[in-house]
Every structure is written in C-alpha cells, then in structure tokens.
Image: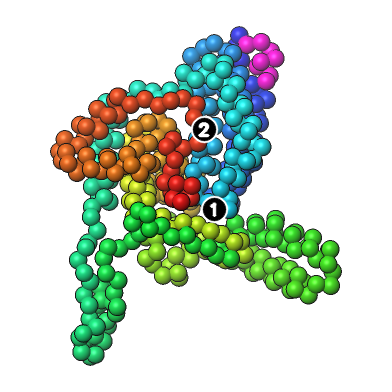
Amino acid sequence: MSDGLPRELSSRLQALRDREAVLEEEVRTAEEKLSGLRDIDRVLSLAAVRLTLARHLLEHHSAEAAEEARQKALGALQLVDGLLSENVSRDQQGVVAASPGYAEVRARLEDFLLAGGGGLLEARQEDARARRILARTIVSAVRKYAGVDDRYAPLDIDDYPPFIRRLLLLLFPVFVREHPQPPPYGIEEGEELTYSSSSMKMPLSQAVFYMEAELIPGLEKELAASPGDARLQEELRGARERVEYYRTLRFFPRSTPVLLEKGYYTDGMTGYTADGEMLVPVPIAVSFSSGTNLDRMMELVRADVVRRIAGRGVSPEIDRQYRYLRSLESGLRGSSRTASMKLDASWGYRALRQEHPFLARLADKRRFVQLVSEIQRRGAGAERLLQSLMESEARAPGRLGPDPPDPTSPETRS
C-alpha cells in the first residue's frame, strides 16, 4: 500500500493502522474476559480511527485503497450502530450520543463523506444466489415464528374433585395448572409494561469488574469524607467480601449455548448467561420495558436468519466469524459442532443489514407486519417477491445508528 505514496502519508497510514490494532485488541480482550462488556470510549475511539484511516486512504487513488477505505468505514459505522442498538436501561438512553467520542466519530464521518467517500458506502449489488438464499431463509424463519399462538383455553381443573386435581397435577405438572391464565398469552402492542428494580444481574466477570472499578472506590471516597459512618463501613466490608468470594468461583463455558425463552423458565435456570456464566445481583437501579409479542417474534426471526446463512457465502463478515468459531483458535467459546449457535445474532444482523439493505424490514414493526402478511398471502410465490424487492432496494450511505431503529431498544419499545 505504501508504493507510490508520499512518505508523510505512508507514515500517517502506518501510525493509524498501529493505533487501530491496539484499540481492536483492547476491545476484543474486554469482550472476551468480561462476558461481552464493551467500553463506550474505546469502541468510539476505534470507530474514529477507522474513519480517519479511511479518509487518508482516499488520497491513494487505487482500487485496492478504495476497497480498504470502504471496509474501514463500514466497520466504523457497524461499531457505532452496535452501541446505539444496545437494549439499555431507560436511565442510560442517550449515553452514547452524549459522549464526546460520538461527536468525534460524526466529525470524522463528515470528513470522509466530503472527501468523496459516500459512494463507497452504498450497498453493493447482491448476486442472484445470495438473494435466493436470503429470500428462502427469511420466508422459512417467518413461517417458523410468525404463526398464531395457541388460542385454546387451558384445562380448568377447579371444578374437578380434589383427588382428581391432585392426580392430574402430579402426572402432568407442565400441562396442567391450578387457576391457569387464559389466552391470549404474552404482551400485545400497546400493552407494554415498565419494570423497575433497585438492582440488576450481571455476569460474574462483569460484576467483579464493576465492584472493583466503581463500587468499592466510590464507597472508599465516601468513607474518607465521613470516617465514622458505620453504614458506609459495613457496605464497604460487604462489597470487599463479595468480590473475594466471587473471585473464588470458576467459569467453564458451555460447548452448546442454552437458548432460554424469556419469562418462561425459573430464576434458577435463567441465572446464567447462554455460555453458562453465573449471573449475580449488583446494586444498580434499572428501569426497562417488557417488550411485546411482536418484538419477540422479530428478534427470533432475525436470529434464525443470521444462523441459517452462516457459512453459506451470503455475508463474508458472518462467514469469517463462523469459521473462527469453528476453529480451535476460538477455544471454549467456540464450537466445532454448533458454531452457528455461538454467533452473536444481534451483531450478525447488523452486519447482514449493512450488506443487504432489504433486511432493514426485519427491524421495523410496520414493515415487518407487512412482510409477514405478504409471505402468508403469497404462499409459494413469497420467495420470488422477496428476491425482486431485494434487487430493487437501495440504501442511503453514511448513516450513523440503526436504520430503521431496532425495536428491541428501549427508545422504540417505549
């Protein structure tokens, strides 16, 4: 890449690549060691460096440099998109957009676009094979998850004799309930609930990091200002004891992740992450929305599409991650047998949407409902319809954040 470049530009590109490599390693290390934790400042810094690198690559007028600039710019936008799409507590809404690093990213993106990089961000023409696989996968996922829930009333045993009720409850503990809830089940649109709690559950590694980096230093600072406060002394002692205990626990990732239906299993079963890491309570107040049946359906469809197309040549980025998860390099967090189940479906969907703009329909409630209706109405012709729509749609370049908004985010759910 340095052939034919002025020495100053070449050294600048190398310095940016070195900085990018350092930040990538820091972000990756934090995610692996702390169960997916992402440092907002580091991620935004990485995005800004990539956009700056992309801007300088435009000065090297070659097809190779243009392709690298495109990859760097798209990678930066995907990083920011991921932060903005996180399902955070209501009190944390706007944290990313209010960060100084976000303003820096917007400025670097503006520089890139003004330098003529906008055309590089346009979606590439999808080949017929990719459209065919995507259309078939979307139709299959929609038909799998968009069916009408069972509306039959559950067996009501209240009027049965006591000995029969006891026998039925003993023989069929899953299918028979006392005072069962009648259909419809779940939460329909417009009936969302807002939950609040004085504490939240975190993966064990994140809880230790939070308590050591924020909770204990904060308590020590308060205690220094008020040395005789017995309450603060007790809280600090308890926090240190919890950290010491948590550090004695060991975590061994599952070979196959457990996909738990939200709100169905007991707290004992949902007290772990999908990889098997223990969730522990941490005194952080949170407020969040329940979401709806439609939110859940859309989430399941998106995840199913990502996992089905992994390794099939539809998305180079997902395929690279899929191959990594199948390799020995991924360690216990990968799987040679069920690598697609180890994929981060939210990340995969954002990467897939960047490459195939049609998939934005899976993150917009109104358009998703229309899509489901068309698939159900068209029958065997649904795949051909989706292929023609994919071919005709285009995406506006240079957008920061989800487009359209992800319905799993609190901003949309509220």
158 relative to 60, above or below? below
Instruction: Give the residue at mark 1.
Output: 90
Give SS at disc 2.
loop
Quadrant in the picture for the N terminus: top right
Amino acid on which disc 2 is placed: Leu
401 or 124: nearer the viewer: 401
Q: Report the residue at 37% width, 51% height from top.
A: 295
The label shown at residue 374 is: none
Q: Report the residue at 36% width, 25% height from top.
A: 394
112 relative to 226, above or below? above
Across and down, in percent, residue 375 comes to 21, 41
In this picture, which residue range is highlighted in magenta? Answer: 5-12
The label shown at residue 400 is: 2
111 or 322: nearer the viewer: 111
Q: Is residue 237 visible?
A: no
Residue 11 is one of the magenta-drawn residues: yes
Q: Report the residue at 42% width, 32% height from top.
A: 354
Dividing the picture into quadrants, the one containing residue 206 is: bottom right
Dividing the picture into quadrants, the one containing residue 351 is: top left
Q: Residues within 10 Å of mark 1 (few under 14, many from 20)?
A: some
